[in-house]
Amino acid sequence: MSDYIIEMENITKEFPGVLANDRVTLQLRRGEVHALLGENGAGKSTLMSILFGLYQPDRGVIRKNGQVVQINNPNDANELQIGMVHQHFKLVEVFTVLENIFLGVEPARFGVLQYQDARRRVVELSQKYGLSVEPDAKIEDITVGMQQRVEILKMLYRDNEILIFDEPTAVLTPQEIKELMAIIRGLKAEGKSILFISHKLNEIMEVSDRCTVLRKGQCIGTVNIQDTTVEELSRMMVGRPIQFKVEKRDQKPGATVLEVENVVVPSKLHKNNAVKGVSFQVRAGEIVCLAGIEGNGQSELVYALTGIEKITAGSIQLQGHDISRASIRQRSRLGISHIPEDRHKYGLILDYNLADNLVLQRYWEPEFQHNGFIRQDEVQAYAKTLIGQYDIRAGQGPSTIARSMSGGNQQKAIIAREIDKNPELLVAIQPTRGLDVGAIEYIHSQLVAQRDAGKAVLLVSLELDEVMNVSDRILVLYEGSIVGEFKPRETTVETLGLYMAGARRSQPEGSVSSEVSADNARKGQRL
């Protein structure tokens, strides 16, 4: 029997205007965790989509256990016991969590769906692997993080032996990431063979045995993790040294740009409010970060600020204007830019081309329209400028359909559009989610540049390293309330973790309460 459970030899895949995979060879050993590393658009997801049957290679062969196999579609992949957790979720939004998990392998007896059997299995799996979900909730109503857990449970439900994780930690909290790392180690111990795509070098160093690096569709090399370093991997990935520490000068905050007073936002998932009387300010020339474990009201609060959700109490003011009831366009015109957490749902129109997506917030301006007609030449020229400035890799340039672009390049397009509007307030939720280290370095520099230009920046991040490095001020949100305020230089990751888990909270006098419960304290310490 072959030493390799999966061999992909000289895989080549070309799309219009881009060679996604150029004679790539990847070999997965039985019972190992093999990382796949590369910049956005390097061809990682394409290669894994070929293995899962979503794409067909133009050239090259795939072997399982030494035998050549033909994988025409995901059903073939599942028959070969290959499962995949997708970076862009493959979920039916109007179905429930439970229905999405067993979709395609429905448990039936005499033609009748056995919901209780499926529910029992899903609950067992979620408890075993620490992937908490609400089986009866609809996908459209749950958070991005919970959708990620559904994707993982879909794969575990099918009992696959070859597991592909495509950016699985991109939307998870620090605590959830640690738990997932433990899950992956446990799956490896059970004899599973795992392909792990990640931009996070520390995760690759922690959990992987070997790592294959792709750059611009080509294989740069495969290294043993124990014989390499983070610096070497980053150099292989982008071809140059990376600055991991965010460089910024001391802040000089100015006038208040955003003022939130006693804002209440209802929850779609339960009767309690998602945001409970939250008040805070963001001033010009500062980056304020909302930190917290996902599901504690960050998303609902940001949607209320940007006009996606309505508030039921309180007020929101932008530079002295009450925008509590303003439309999304009105808020945009008054100077709010929004980088959303779900780029597909709120950030892009996937079937539009890149140029049209880049002017979504500005197409009505005189620069881009005349007498009600879009000035296509101006739109194309503007798109080319942003593509070059933000290194958006699109095979057909401005004409590239957004759906066909890699996740990282979709994210770059949104960031380019929102920052180039020259906003007074930039609201960024997980702006570096799914980006490689080179792109993260660039986005962080852009956020700091906005702050240094006297703009207000409200950042929502689940990455504690990002929170500590980029922010000037940190507000911790727990169960819909702000429970602590910190300056990065005056706190620690461990302290933030305790507040994020609810084990501590600031009192009105500034003192800190005792631990809420031993269980919450343990959760905080695991962060």
Image: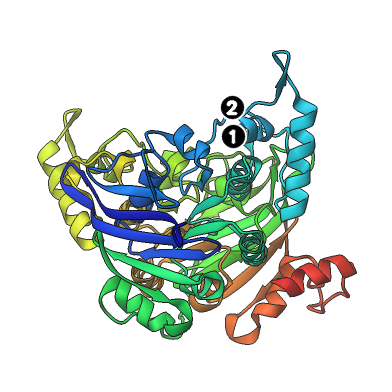
Of residue 421 and residue 36, the one placed in the foreground of this image is 36
- Is residue 187 or residue 70 the one in the foreground? 70
Image position, residue 202 (x, y; %): 51, 75
State the mark number for residue 94.
2
Outermost residue to the front? 1
Measuring 80% from the left and 28% from the top, which residue is drawn there? 116
**Above-or-below relation of 131 to 110:** below
- In the rendered image of this protein, does residue 306 appear above or below residue 424? above
Residue at the image point whose x is 17% and y is 44% from the top: 396
Visible residue check, residue 270: no
Mark 1, residue position: 140
Asked whether, in this view, residue 211 is left or right of residue 509, the answer is: left
- From the viewer's perspective, is 275 left or right of 23? right
On screen, residue 275 versus residue 514, left or right, reads left
What is the quadrant of the C terminus in the image?
Answer: bottom right
Residue 317, horizontal then vertical, whole percent:
55, 53
Q: Amino acid at mark 1?
A: Glu
Mark 1 vs 2, N-terminal side: 2
- Splitting the image into 4 quarters, where does residue 388 fall? bottom left
Q: Residue at x 13, y 43 (%)?
A: 378
Residues at circles 1 and 2 in contact by the CB criterion of under 8 Å:
yes
The residue at the far top in this view is 110
